[in-house]
């Protein structure tokens, strides 16, 4: 038999890889005994700043609470790299490799929606804290649950109270990112404007990667609004706010950031710029509720940090999955889902409840105001709560039609 | 027309920063025929050194003076150690190595300063707005325009009136001739690369009070630099200036006219320039 | 006769790779991801390795292929063949448009032009949010069984079944590209890469050749995109982002542009090592950056040249007389 050297080398290489890969094959053959809880966050790439706290929170929840609930949890952390394609591929790999059924997290809405669909197909449970309406709206499914308040509630709990607080501020200008999510916020805002007789003096769309907002702010200023409503988020809202302050707009115009990311963002913005600005957020460390007190103590004890929305979002998603397992008395996803639907519990914002028809948590959304430096009680005390409340679409209004 | 006046001012401010980023890239490519995908990383380092030095010493001016010099030194070291080996190879390897360098710098920044962005305050001298009746404009942005104009003038003098500048200009036409005339080409390349990095770092320092410092700001600077270099013409100082200002002003004015499209317009312009007038506004063929 | 179809070693190597991957990787999903990117890298390798064109437009074809396949499956209900065919048509059209315009320029201008087009397509994709899903991506792409005249060939319901589809598409495209580069057409492409002026002087219409190569590359990458959409049941906006082009280019160069099999090595290396590193250290991009620097500086032939070097050493050790050897020219495997 003529042995081609090339073939020989390649076969030898293949053989070596097979031997080396045997453990991987063996690993798949042995079934996992503990229940796996997999968290999915961007730990590298552009969203690492928000992903890391989420991962920390989820891990903290598991370490601190699993034993209390009588559960034996194996925690796995997946880096979605801020890339939806990689994130979903890794979730698929995790499902196939280890049969993992329980997933928590996601920062990007696109990742959450796609992962939710995959987890549903494999019959698992996915708890997320992203903002896109579709998660508990048009794309809802039996496996996906969401803790955070979607755009309707965010607008209702920020714009409506402000209109009541400042009845003379009739002219509002909006700055909106050209995202599906940005459009949802804008739609809800425009509805409120119509209802309350507010003059929507203009809107500026901007692209997904914009960092220079001077042009849009100049436009806004030219329209002479009473209130500047920022519907963007993340580093874009940080930059818009910073540049608005640079242009001296804070003196004449009230600025509202509807979808703030919490403490990490306040730190990035800085006290001077944040002073007097109204922000909307899903959570704040100063919330006065038994659930939150417990969380603040836990974070201090185990992680030596102050909880923020990013970390509490991760914490609560993991926590609720575990509570579901405890209530169901089993790690069978169908049972856990049944147990979660309609569950009332003591959450970070007080009494919270998971709606059965769309798997959305009913919780407060907060309107906060930036404090001046003189009033700060500590270096991380950036905002104070102005008002809060629960606003959600009814089942009739919702786009969610779960089988 | 007050609105458009302010938009133009905005555009000039951003445009000047674009010019500083692009001129280095343009000269590096014009002289060395070297595609530098790490250019955005120098901008990133500039912003972070500004933050670090200003935080440590409370002096923006120190950051402005020292930061870019440090980046220039770093670039010099990188160039003499390993980048110089890649001048004769195909562009794809140059792109690969500088992409790798950019990733390394970016991740080091995250390791040192964390993944969350930080804010940098403008120097006390230029905080606040300049008011003139109804018109109010941030003092810092006016400073950026003024400072960059002075810098542009200095660079121009460097190019036109000094020996190094003459060699540089000759180099953009033909490095062979220059080396045949007995000038150490490799020294020239190192200096040029370091100068380009210095200017990108300077742009980063200037931009930090406007848009903060965050670890993933490199690619955006790189992209803009490519657009400006193409539109202005590769290897041309005047091209980088004209291109930068043009792109900045167009972006600003577009945000009043068609805001979502402001970004894509510059790529359309870039494609049109390459197709119809490849040498750009001021470049040589 | 089979020998004439494809040189045995290359064929065996690719079959071996495709068989071995799902066995040694921790999950079939990862193997599928690897194969998808192998195909995408093949498309880039054709342009970069054989014509010498560095295009940042890979993401255009990848994204267009994914969207076309996804949209066809969602709205037209025409099955997997239909989805793949839609991806074929759309990626060829995109390749034709971008290629015909970009080919006019050479060198760095070509690179910048493809870069600009990539950004424009990205913008179009997210602006047409009602069609593509915008930044949410195209969700719920179905994966119906692969049937021929009513007979189900592959159910595509199981991960292994999906992998088989990807593997078969890979093998078909690999054979096709192999024949292509070994043919006179391929030799002309190499001639254009080596010295375009001379090729023109000899009488070739290099423009047409380059455009055809661009279109073929676009088609191959589009097929990868279509498979990706089927695999993930999802076509995100990130498919058409410039960073996807960067990723594919990195895989191509790291694998080695001297041989089509380099694409197999490059894509496998990037996906597997990337996943491994990312699970260990969030700052894995730092390691990737160092790898890129090392490859560009010291291992320009990529991983393929490493394999070749190993083989040379082994041949020197154990010379086997009379063994039939593959021609060593750059067109071979």
Image (cartoon, helix red, strand yellow):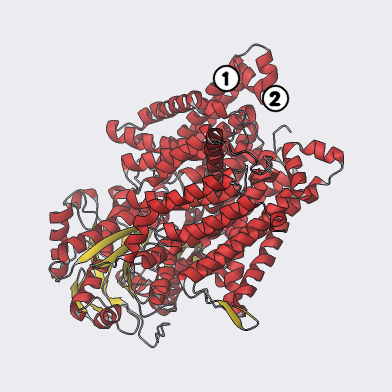
Residue at left 70%, top 61%? C92
Label 2 element class: helix
Pointer 2 local density, CA inside 10 Å: few below 14, some 14–19, many at least 20: some
Q: Position of residue C34 (x, y in %)?
A: 50, 57
Label 1 element class: helix
Residue farthest along the top direction in this orientation: B182
Q: In the displayed structure, would residue C330 be above or below residue A199? A: above
Q: Chain of mark 2?
A: B
Residue nearest the viewer, comparing A171 with A54: A54
Res A351 visible: no
Q: Which mark is residue B129?
A: none
Asked which quadrant contains residue A306, the reply is bottom left
Is mark 1 in CB contact (under 8 Å) with mark 2?
A: no
Residue nearest the viewer, comparing C160 with A135: C160
Residues marked 1 and 2, same chain: yes
Residue that carries the numbered disc 1 in the rendered image: B186
Q: In the displayed structure, would residue A87 be above or below residue C266? A: below
Residue farthest along the front direction in this orientation: A1
Residue at left 33%, top 41%? B111
Alpha carbon distance from label 1 to label 2: 16 Å
Res A65 visible: yes
Pointer 1 local density, CA inside 10 Å: few below 14, some 14–19, many at least 20: some
Q: Position of residue C109 (x, y in %)?
A: 68, 41
Q: In the displayed structure, would residue A253 be above or below residue A166? A: above
Please identify the quadrant where the C terminus of chain B is shown.
top right
Q: Position of residue B75 (x, y in %)?
A: 47, 28
Residue at left 61%, top 19%? B165
Residue that carries the numbered disc 2 in the rendered image: B173
Residue at left 30%, top 65%? A30
Q: Chain of mark 1?
A: B
Residue nearest the viewer, comparing A247 with C312: C312
């Amino acid at each position: 038999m003529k042995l081609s050297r090339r073939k020989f080398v390649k076969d030898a290489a293949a053989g070596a890889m097979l031997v080396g890969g045997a453990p991987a094959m063996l690993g798949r053959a042995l079934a996992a005994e503990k229940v796996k809880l997999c968290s999915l966050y961007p730990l590298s790439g552009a969203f690492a700043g928000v992903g890391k706290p989420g991962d920390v929170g989820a891990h903290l929840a598991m370490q601190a609470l699993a034993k209390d609930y009588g559960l034996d949890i194996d925690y796995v952390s997946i880096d979605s790299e801020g890339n939806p394609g990689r994130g979903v591929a890794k979730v698929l790999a995790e499902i196939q490799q280890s049969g993992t059924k329980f997933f928590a997290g996601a920062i990007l809405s696109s990742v959450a929606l796609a992962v939710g669909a995959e987890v549903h197909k494999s019959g698992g449970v996915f708890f997320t804290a992203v903002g896109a309406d579709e998660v508990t709206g048009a794309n809802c499914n039996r496996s996906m649950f969401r803790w955070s308040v979607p755009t309707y509630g965010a607008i209702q709990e920020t714009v409506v109270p402000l209109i009541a607080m400042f009845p003379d501020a009739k002219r509002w200008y909006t700055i909106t990112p050209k995202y599906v999510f940005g459009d949802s916020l804008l739609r809800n805002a425009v509805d409120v404007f119509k209802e309350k007789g507010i003059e929507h003096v203009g809107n500026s769309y901007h692209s997904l990667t914009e960092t220079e907002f001077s042009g849009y702010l100049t436009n806004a200023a030219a329209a002479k609004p009473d209130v500047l409503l920022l519907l963007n988020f993340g580093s874009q809202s940080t930059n818009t706010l910073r540049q608005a302050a640079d242009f001296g707009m804070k003196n004449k115009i009230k600025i509202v950031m509807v979808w703030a990311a919490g403490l990490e963002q306040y730190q990035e913005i800085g006290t001077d710029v944040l002073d007097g600005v109204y922000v909307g957020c899903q959570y704040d460390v100063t919330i006065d509720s038994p659930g939150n007190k417990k969380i603040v103590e836990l974070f201090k004890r185990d992680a030596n940090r102050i909880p923020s929305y990013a970390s509490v979002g991760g914490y609560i998603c993991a926590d609720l999955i575990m509570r579901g397992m405890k209530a169901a008395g089993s790690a069978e996803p169908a049972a856990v889902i049944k147990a979660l639907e309609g569950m009332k519990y003591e959450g970070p914002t007080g009494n919270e409840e998971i709606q059965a028809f769309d798997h959305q948590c009913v919780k407060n959304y907060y309107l906060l105001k930036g404090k001046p430096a003189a009033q700060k009680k500590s270096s991380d005390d950036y905002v104070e709560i102005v008002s809060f409340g629960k606003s959600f679409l009814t089942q009739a209004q919702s786009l969610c039609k779960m089988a | 027309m007050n609105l458009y006046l302010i938009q133009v001012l905005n555009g000039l401010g951003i445009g000047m920063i674009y010019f500083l980023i692009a001129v280095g890239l343009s000269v590096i490519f014009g002289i060395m025929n070297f595609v530098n995908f790490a250019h955005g990383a120098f901008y990133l380092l500039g912003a972070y050194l500004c933050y670090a030095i200003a935080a440590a010493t409370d002096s923006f001016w120190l950051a402005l003076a020292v930061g870019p010099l440090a980046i220039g030194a770093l670039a010099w070291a990188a160039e003499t150690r390993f980048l110089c080996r890649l001048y004769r190879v195909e562009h794809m390897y140059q792109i690969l190595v500088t992409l790798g360098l950019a990733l390394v710098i970016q991740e080091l920044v995250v390791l040192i300063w964390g993944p969350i962005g930080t804010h940098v305050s403008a120097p006390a001298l230029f905080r606040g707005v300049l008011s003139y009746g109804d018109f109010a404009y941030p003092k810092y942005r006016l400073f950026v325009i003024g400072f960059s104009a002075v810098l542009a003038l200095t660079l121009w003098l460097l190019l036109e009136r000094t020996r190094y500048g003459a060699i540089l200009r000759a180099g953009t036409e033909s490095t062979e001739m220059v080396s045949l005339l007995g000038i150490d080409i490799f020294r020239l390349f190192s200096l040029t690369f370091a100068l380009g990095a210095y200017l990108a770092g300077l742009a980063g320092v200037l931009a930090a009070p406007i848009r903060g410092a965050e670890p993933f700001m490199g690619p955006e600077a790189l992209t803009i630099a490519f657009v400006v270099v193409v539109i202005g013409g590769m290897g041309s100082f005047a091209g980088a200036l004209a291109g930068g200002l043009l792109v900045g002003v167009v972006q600003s004015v577009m945000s009043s006219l068609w805001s979502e499209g402001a970004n894509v317009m510059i790529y359309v312009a870039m494609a049109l320039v390459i197709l119809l007038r490849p040498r750009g506004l001021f470049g040589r063929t | 006769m089979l020998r004439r179809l494809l040189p045995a070693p290359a064929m065996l190597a690719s079959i071996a790779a495709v068989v071995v991957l799902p066995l040694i990787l921790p999950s079939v999903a990862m193997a599928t991801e690897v194969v998808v990117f192998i195909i995408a890298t093949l498309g880039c390798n054709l342009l970069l390795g054989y014509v010498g064109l560095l295009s940042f437009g890979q993401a255009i074809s990848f994204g267009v292929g994914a969207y076309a396949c996804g949209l066809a499956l969602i709205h037209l209900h025409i099955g997997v063949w239909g989805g793949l065919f839609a991806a074929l048509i759309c990626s060829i059209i995109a390749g034709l448009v971008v290629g015909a315009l970009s080919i006019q320029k050479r060198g760095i201008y070509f690179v910048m032009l493809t870069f600009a087009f990539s950004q424009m397509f990205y913008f179009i994709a997210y602006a047409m949010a009602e069609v593509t899903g915008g930044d949410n991506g195209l969700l719920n792409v179905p994966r119906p069984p692969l049937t021929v005249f009513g007979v189900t060939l592959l159910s595509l319901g199981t991960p292994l079944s999906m992998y088989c589809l990807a593997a078969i598409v890979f093998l078909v495209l690999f054979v096709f590209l192999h024949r292509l580069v070994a043919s006179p057409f391929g030799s002309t492409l190499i001639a254009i890469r080596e010295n375009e002026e001379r090729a023109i002087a000899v009488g070739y219409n290099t423009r047409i050749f380059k455009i055809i190569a661009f279109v073929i590359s676009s088609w191959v990458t589009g097929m990868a995109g279509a498979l990706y959409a089927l695999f993930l049941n999802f076509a995100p906006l990130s498919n058409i982002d410039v960073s996807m082009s960067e990723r594919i280019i990195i895989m191509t160069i790291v694998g080695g542009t001297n041989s089509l099999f380099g694409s197999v090595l490059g894509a496998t290396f990037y996906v597997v090592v990337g996943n491994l590193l990312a699970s260990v250290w969030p700052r894995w991009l730092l390691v990737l950056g160092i790898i890129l620097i090392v490859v560009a500086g010291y291992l320009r032939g990529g991983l393929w040249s490493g394999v070749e070097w190993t083989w040379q050493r082994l041949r020197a050790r154990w010379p086997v007389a009379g063994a039939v050897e593959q021609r060593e020219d750059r067109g071979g495997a």
